[in-house]
Image (cartoon, rainbow, N blue to C red):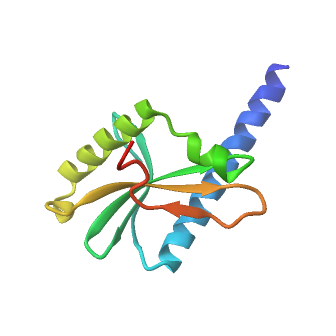
Amino acid sequence: MKATKVRQGVRNRRAGRRSEFLCALWLMAKGYQLLGFRLRTSQAEIDLLALKKGVVAVVEVKRRRTLGEAIEAVSYAQRRRLEAAARAIGARRPDLAGKPVRLDLIALAPGRLPRHIPDAWRDA
């Protein structure tokens, strides 16, 4: 039973990486410049960091069975960690100083195009 869980974990990690790569391509096709991929901070991991028209997008990628499930998959606590991670990255990157930062979500589901939601939690 343990070996099955390990194999499932490996499959999930690979699927997550493929999803992040697909989303990076999606953002670049939409005119974003990719600044970072799977950036680790002590607060959280930023899936994608991108820039468009002077705005830095901290992008969380979620893949679930439906787009609705993917959109709902980011908890309030995770959003707060992403905000802290964005501040930490901004402090380490002088090229980002003074640029507005927003938290975006890209939701993925089998058989559906990615759904990019800029500033996904502004009113949350």
Which one is nearer the viewer's eye here, 118 or 40? 118
Residue at screen point 37% across, 42% down: 82
Looking at the image, the residue that sits furthest to the front is: 123
Q: Position of residue 35 (x, y in %)?
A: 36, 65
Left or right: residue 96 compared with residue 7: left
Q: Quadrant of the C terminus?
A: top left
Left or right: residue 2 compared with residue 86: right
Q: Quadrant of residue 119?
A: bottom left
Residue at screen point 40% across, 48% down: 121
Q: Position of residue 27 (x, y in %)?
A: 49, 71
Which one is nearer the viewer's eye here, 121 or 84? 121
Residue at screen point 51% across, 39% down: 74
Residue at screen point 52% across, 63% down: 116
Looking at the picture, does residue 35 appear above or below residue 6? below
Q: Position of residue 117 (x, y in %)?
A: 49, 60
Q: Quadrant of the N terminus?
A: top right
Looking at the picture, does residue 59 appear above or below residue 22? above
Looking at the image, the residue that sits furthest to the top is: 1
